[in-house]
Amino acid sequence: MTDVPGRPRAKNSRKGTPSAHRRKAEFSGRNDERRAIIAVTTLCNETFIRATTRDDDWHASRAVAVAGGATWALAVLQYVAATLIAASAWTSPHYNWLNNSISNLANTECRTFAVPNGTPGYVCSPLHAVMNGSFVLTGVLVIVGALLLWRIRPSSWLNDTALVLLVIMGLGKILVGFAPENTDVGLHLMGALNVPLGSMAVLLLSLVMRRTDPGLSAIGMVLAVVGLVGMVLSTVGEYAGPALYLGLGAGGMVRVAAYPAPLWLLLVGVFTIARATRSVHATRSVYAISPSGPRQGLLSS
């Protein structure tokens, strides 16, 4: 281009600025890093993990999450197995899932028995030791799982209260195992308060999770309400009559009250294991893009 006499040379507006290709590459790189970080953050929040800047801290938190989830899953699976085994050994007459309570499986004598205000019935559980041992083991595993997950969850009054209730629930299970209904019915019924406490803990934890995992939160809320309603109907039915059992019998309504909390703990345990295991791949993507790793507090809830 020829300069026009008397007119100053036009400055190159592109001088010293990155090319369009370079700008596009930088923008793409930042977006890739942001997407990877968001993926890790989401996965970690869903599995209650809070990571720091150090890689070994992240793996330690993930290991704790897996251990906590596995402990809760094991607590429920062994409880289900023990219930089925103890019930299958009850043959004189056969165990009735609608009329016999869960505690009848742990009764240590063969005779007619009834809790206060309950309907008398013949009880004979040859494998009562299996059921009582399962009650104790369930309580221990629920407490251990709660303490493990407590270490890596962000603190809040809802979360802390729920985990305290789970610890008390575990202690109640242990008390039920050491005090069968026919040996000390007062202590046994005190331990049975673990049932409504477990439903209340599930409700509170579901409220905590409503943003990070709305699906699991909704399931927890439904199960908690079912458990609490079942507990009310089961308790009031002992005084007001069997009509409140809604055709399920005393044993069936007890299960409506008692089973929702363990079912939710099993779901949370399995999902925690799966997501904590899967999230490590997304974490490696962050470290591959940014060698310094996630910044402090990035993965905190």
Image (cartoon, rainbow, N blue to C red):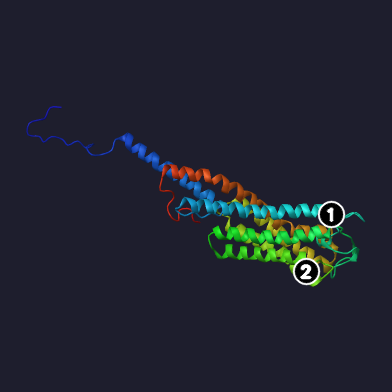
**Type of residue at label 1?**
Ala
**Residue 143 location (% of width, % of height):** 65, 62
Q: Residues within 10 Å of mark 2 (few under 14, many from 20)?
A: some
In the image, residue 295 sits, relative to residue 118, either above or below, namely above
**Residue that protrudes farthest toward the left in the picture:** 6
Residue to which mark 2 is pinned: 189
Residue 43: assigned label: none
Question: Marks 1/2: CA distance?
Answer: 21 Å
76 or 245: nearer the viewer: 76
Residue extending farthest top: 1
Is disc 1 placed on a helix, strand or loop? helix
Residue sitting nearer the eye, 37 or 110: 110
- Which mark's residue is nearer the viewer, 1 or 2? 1
Q: Name the residue at 81% across, 70% down.
A: 185
Tell me: residue 27, above or below residue 58: above
Mark sitting earlier along the chain (1/2): 1
Image coordinates of residue 153 in percent, x first then y, are: 55, 58
Side (left or right) of 7 relative to 156: left
Instruction: Give coordinates of residue 10: x percent, y percent.
Output: 15, 35
Residue 258 image offset from top left, x and y in percent: 74, 59
- Figure quadrant of residue 123: bottom right
Q: Residues within 10 Å of mark 1 (few under 14, many from 20)?
A: many
Quadrant in the rendering for residue 71: bottom right
Residue denoted by label 1: 87
Q: Amino acid at mark 2?
A: Leu
